[in-house]
Amino acid sequence: MNFQFESTSKIEISASAFRQNLTYLRNEFGSGTEISAVVKGNAYGHSIPVFVPLAESEGIRHFSVFSAEEAWNVKKNLTHDSDIMIMGSIPDESLSWVIESGIEFYVFELERLELALKTADRMNLKARIHLEFETGMNRTGFDILELESIREMLNRFPNAYEIEGICTHFAGAESSANFVRVRRQLKKFKQVVRLSTKNGIHAKKLHAACSAAALTFPDTQMDMVRIGIALYGYWPTPETYMHHRLRSGADAIEHIQADPLKRVLSWKSRVMSVKSVQPGEFVGYGTSYLAGIPTKIAAVPVGYAYGFTRSLSNLGRVIVGGQRTSVIGVVNMNMMLVDITETPHVKRGDEVVLIGEQNGHEITVASFSEMTRHINYETLVRLPADIPRILLEK
Ligand SMILES: *Cc1c(COP(=O)(O)O)cnc(C)c1O
């Protein structure tokens, strides 16, 4: 017997939108600055197996991830000789695999530095390290006062390392409220670099910027930028977008320009069933939705188990039958109900857009943020890994 299962929804990945984002970003950064594609969180929900080969086909050769496990997943899906950099967690027992695989990684404390050097030394290999420094975010990173200890440690294992980078991370470059803090961090970073050089520590690359920093403060770009959200087609915050528009004259009345960043991902399902509800009846679990008029509803086989958050009960929007309409009642584990009273021609099997476009209407990722407390980043990474991702040329 041969069963065929179709998933209850699918996520489309637009190659042309990605290309457009990359073209815009490359123009912003100039040729001396390499783009490292940040693909943590399953490539911000776009799926590592689909997104990594797509990025490589457009010339990306550097990928940033959070953990050793994600690095393993990226490595498995590489189609070129690209570099992978771990910015966060490496369990001690994975360190030898990381070094042996030639994967670059952040080192932000002496204990990890020593372990990395010892491990590489034992294997007769070089650990490809990025020294991360604390400049004011107060998350991870060496203190500038540790520079001498770092040098001493490095001197004990002169053949066990390659210093690929010296780096830091900004604490909120996406908001002008943090302007002074970010400028102070940059100043501190420059001081770190000067002092490292003085201590004989030279890195191949200096890097500090995420999307917001790179787009708002061009002097943070340096040798490499670590770009996540913008590659996928989103501004880190509306403020970052305003900054772009004002600077580029995109609001000049003579030539109002379209947003240069395009959403790469769309999320779609199909109508599972339709039915009519009499006025005075409650719809779905409990009493949160009362049909006040003769109402037509469609059941859509997507619920909170599939990443459509329950906080969108009676609030969410979808597009079906060419019209935007509302989620009614509570979002169930595997299903939700939407109002099709105004589009009574909708039938079983019709496309339902959860994120994306249909008939000139659009549901944005940001619209999820307006109704929940999820920022774009969170809405994207909550999309379950087991929803199939389909790569589209257009
Ligand atoms: C996630 C992350 C980035 C990318 O941030 P975006 O805002 O998505 O561009 C860059 N650097 C570090 C250290 C990160 O954790």
Image (spheres, rainbow, N blue to C red):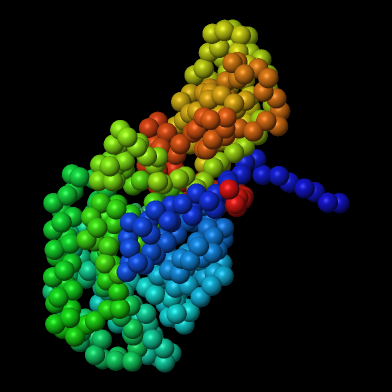
The percent coordinates of residue 132 (x first, y second) are 26, 70
Q: Is residue 242 visible?
A: yes
Q: Quadrant of residue 279?
A: top right
The percent coordinates of residue 38 (x first, y second) are 41, 60
- Of all residues, the one furthest to the front in this rendering is 254
Answer above or below: position of 278 versus 362: above
Count of marks overlaid on the render: 0
Residue visible at 71% across and 28% down in the picture: 348
Which quarter of the rendered image does ligand 1 occupy?
bottom left
Left or right: residue 300 compared with residue 130 = right
The percent coordinates of residue 252 (x first, y second) are 29, 36
Residue visible at 80% across and 49% down in the picture: 3
Answer above or below: position of 147 versus 267: below
The percent coordinates of residue 339 (x first, y second) are 57, 20
Answer above or below: position of 379 versus 126: above
Left or right: residue 206 compared with residue 339 = left
Answer above or below: position of 51 versus 224: above
Q: Is residue 76 visible?
A: no
Residue visible at 54% across and 53% down in the picture: 15
Q: Nearer the viewer, residue 362 or 40?
A: 362
Left or right: residue 382 compared with residue 219 = right
